[in-house]
Image (cartoon, rainbow, N blue to C red):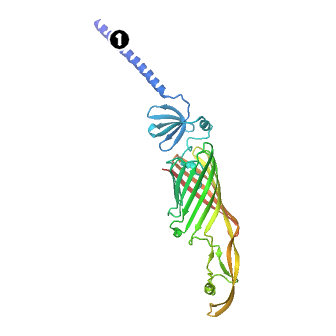
Amino acid sequence: MIMENVQIKRLLATSWKLVVILIVSCLSTSALAQVDGNKDTTDKQLMLVTKTDGGQFYGYILSDDGREILLMTKTIGKIYISKADIASIVKVSDTESKKIESGAYSDYRNEGPFTTRYYLTTNALPIKKKENYAMIHLYGPEVHFAVSDNLSIGVMSSWIASPIAVATKYAFNSKSDNHFALGTIVGSSGFLFNASGAGGLHFGTFTKGDRKANMSISAGYGWTILGSDLRRSYDYKYDVRGEYHYDRSSTNALAQFNGFSISEVLDKPFTGAGVFGISGITPVGKKASFIFDGMAVLTPNYKRSVSQTYKVDGVTYTDHNGNIVVKDYLIDEYELTPDGIKPTILIMPGMRFNQSHNKAFQIVLAGVITTNSIGKIITFPVPMVSWLRTF
């Protein structure tokens, strides 16, 4: 009997302990649930989360435990982002929120240096400070540095560092979808051709649209100064009427007569041209965009015309057979006169594939349309590929 009472007391004590443990557990669970409930946000404010590597995501913050956030994005769903990888979290305005909700923006491509250019040309969208990037072509690299939120400076060259050019662009601030920028490119032939060539392009660009989809119209003036090693020969300045210009026995005699240089050529060391362009970009899928670059270069054309004729009498020379010959010559002097405009059109449709925020690959199937010396239209393809990287 005594043993039974002892066992009953032990069972009651154990039962009370279990009850106490259950009560404490329930209270703890309720408290934790309340704390966790405090972490879940009910605020439906759209946020722009920028990572330290430059990547940006639009979405709603579902939870924040102090170490990482859970972000609900529109296109890729829920993602966890460590707070150590977050540079900033900014509320998106109601106007921008409506654009994003309607599909105007995706989780990629809203910002970044790649959105400020097409394949060859740039748009008028402003670059942000420290958004530096490199563009690697098959023929050579180019590097662009954002020295401020609106000004960028770049260097372009071939793999042998010649020719080489410096490019600058300043984009004016705009709060609408209309943007304007001014730019210039100045280059030299470098150590090629003894640095005898130089050129430049000065332009203005108007862009309509945002960073995801836009169209640009550009206009400018290009020029070249060609030294003796690069001057284009249009033809000879002097021509002996009725005689073949090369390999004739009288060449030396004529060259010494009255200072005529039969080998002198007509060239135009300075050439200016009007440059016009139209370009655009639009997204195709989540990480790809269609890009288009079009450019027209309008160069003044020239023709060779006789300016005056000289009569040279009694030129004495020895022919190929060793005979002494005395002959009279008429020598025509030529000059270059304007003869309309020579157009050269570059058409570049292509695709850009955004591998990530800081990497992209693009390919274009470019073609050139121009005319030859007799005005016949000639065309030829120039396919190109390049890689974009931020740093």
Q: Residue sitting at 55 percent across and 44 percent down?
A: 111
> Callout 1 environment at 10 Å: few (<14), some (14 to 19), or many (20+)?
few
For the view shown, which residue lies furthest in the bottom direction?
Answer: 323
Q: Position of residue 68 (x, y in %)?
A: 46, 35
Q: Residue sitting at 32 percent across and 10 percent down?
A: 9
Q: Taking 97 as reference, is 384 above or below it?
A: below
Amino acid bearing label 1: Leu
Q: Residue sitting at 61 percent across and 51 percent down?
A: 291
For the view shown, which residue lies furthest in the top direction?
Answer: 1
Q: Is residue 371 visible?
A: no
Foreground of the two, 343 or 346: 343
Q: Position of residue 73 (x, y in %)?
A: 55, 36
| SS state under label 1 | helix
The answer to which image quadrant residue 236 occupies is bottom right
Q: Taking 342 as reference, is 2 above or below it?
A: above
Q: Specify whether 266 is left or right of 190.
A: right
For the view shown, which residue lies furthest in the front direction?
Answer: 258
Q: Position of residue 268 (x, y in %)?
A: 63, 70
Q: Is residue 36 visible?
A: yes
Q: Taking 327 as reference, is 155 above or below it?
A: above
Q: How many marks?
A: 1
Kindly identify which residue carries mark 1.
12
Foreground of the two, 307 or 3: 307
Q: Specify whether 58 is left or right of 336.
A: left
Q: Taking 110 as reference, is 135 above or below it?
A: below
Q: Position of residue 215 (x, y in %)?
A: 64, 49
Q: Specify whether 80 is left or right of 309.
A: left
